[in-house]
Amino acid sequence: MKKNKVIFLATEIILCVLALFFTFKMFDQNETEKKVAVIVQNSGDKNWNSFIKGLKESAKVNNIHLIICNADEINNIDDQKELINEQIENGVDAFIISPAPGSKTKTEMKTICGDKPFILVTEDVYMGENKKSEYPVIKPDNYKIGYSLGKEMVGKSIKKIGIVLGQEEKEETADRYKGFEDAIKDSGMKVAWKYNGIENKDIVKIVNRRSKVDAIVALDNYSLDDLGENAREDSYNGAKIYGVGTNVESLVLVDYGKVECVIIPDGYEMGYKSVKEITERLNHTFYVMKSTNVEHKIVYKKDLFTTDIERFLYSYE
């Protein structure tokens, strides 16, 4: 009987200790959870789904409280400044930012964020050709994306090309176009016209008014989706569409034959790694965040159901 009482008391003590331990861990976790604000243009758009999934899964692993800011168009650093200041007032610890267009962004970004660490995503700040900001950035190699797309088109009976670009004064726009130009140099292909895509403009109508070309290259994902969705047999004078996509709809357009070829950057990995790097910086004051280029895939209709594309499809779910 005495032995049973001892066992009972020992069990009770162990259970109490475990309860206290888990209670402490729960409160400790709440106290140490860092807040990281994410500022990207049109944050609710489907083009961010894969990126946001990567953010959230990394945040769970790294004990980070994410605040995905409700942002619409960001046309310059002043638009971004308002969002950053609002989050600083809310007590965030760090930022993940897709930088605003414009040559002023580099100098003003550091001033606005102050002592709050930040990491850039999707692209570096715009610095002009062949210049880097030296800020930490997790992004695809935008030059390589443009170059890869150009090389895919070489030797395919394409003579005249129309190009739709993203916003002006953006590293993404400049580097993709430079890469594309370098890829088709001496190939016999010529750029007949180019247009900087502006949201809320009817890109389909604009392209249909341009001179006839053999292929249209959409170097930003919004234009690719709009052009692909509206493609018919007689659309765009029969021009085939090539481009860069960041959502599952881009792959559907390839499957339906409305887009010939699409390059897909790994948005999931970009989101995951950006949280991982900013967490290291928050946990270790002297940690130097590392810049990384995430991979991209070249996708034709024949590639859609290959093993190599499966993880990309998973990241969009």
Image (tube, grey):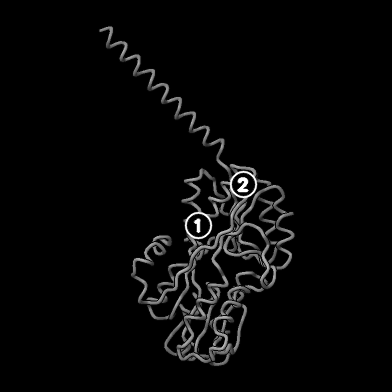
Q: Position of residue 99 (x, y in %)?
A: 64, 62
Residue at mark 1? 52
Residue at x-position 56% and y-position 54%:
68
Q: Position of residue 312 (x, y in %)?
A: 42, 64
Label disc, if present, on residue 274 of the rendered structure: none
**The furthest residue to the front:** 186
Residue at x-position 48% and y-position 55%:
54
Observer-nearest of 31 and 189: 189
**Element type at mark 2:** loop
In the rendered image of this protein, does residue 16 appear above or below residue 236?
above
The image quadrant of residue 298 is bottom left
Q: Position of residue 39 (x, y in %)?
A: 60, 57
Please give left or right for residue 303 compared with residue 98 in the image: left
The image quadrant of residue 144 is bottom right
In the rendered image of this protein, does residue 46 appear above or below residue 155?
above
Q: Position of residue 4 (x, y in %)?
A: 27, 12
**Element type at mark 1:** helix
Observer-nearest of 294 and 271: 294
> Which image quarter is the N terminus in?
top left
**The furthest residue to the left:** 1
Residue at mark 2? 287
Dot 2 or dot 1, earlier in sequence: 1
**Looking at the picture, which amino acid does disc 1 mark?**
Ile
